[in-house]
Amino acid sequence: MKEIHIGQAIEQRLHDLRMTQTEFGKLIGCPQPNIKRILSSPYIRTDKLQQICQVLNYNFFSLFVEPATPVDKPEDTVTTTLLNERIKHLEDLVNEKERTIRLLMKEQKKE
């Protein structure tokens, strides 16, 4: 899991929005000393972070999540194997039908 200093991330968002700490405090209903504490802390309560996400229109929770990497599930491998076998079988059938058609066309030419 990534190390995230949530206070710094919030402070960066305030900077990006050109919002002062005073304006931010008014929006979330916190006095200036509490804002300074939020911005200097690497941790925050989830309910407070939800409120901040809404006010700043940014999903800070996404910072804590690594992008998902696709992983083959065992059933995917089985499904792929079965599909490959089915494809091979169908290819064999097509080849057999093509041979039959060629033979029939040869016989028809003889007649």
Image: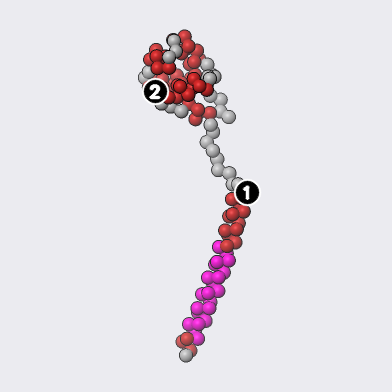
Q: Nearer the viewer, residue 74 or 42?
A: 74
Residue 58 point in image, percent of width and height = 43, 27
Look at the image and tell me whether residue 69 can be seen: yes
Residue 65 vertical position relative to residue 9 in the rendered view, above or below: below
User: What residue does disc 1 label?
Assistant: 74
The quarter of the image holding the N terminus is top right
Amino acid carrying mark 2 in the image: Asp
Seen at 54% across and 67% down, the residue is 91
Q: Start and end of the magenta stretch?
A: 87-107
Residue 23: which numbered mark, if any? none
The secondary element bearing badge 1 is classed as: helix
Amino acid carrying mark 1 in the image: Pro
In the visual, does 86 lie left or right of 110? right
- Residues at badges 1 and 2 in contact (C-beta under 8 Å)? no
Q: Earlier in the sequence, mark 1 or mark 2?
A: 2
The secondary element bearing badge 2 is classed as: helix
In the visual, does 52 lie left or right of 76? left
Residue 43 point in image, percent of width and height = 54, 19
Numbered disc total: 2
Q: Residue furthest left?
A: 18
Residue 16: which numbered mark, if any? 2
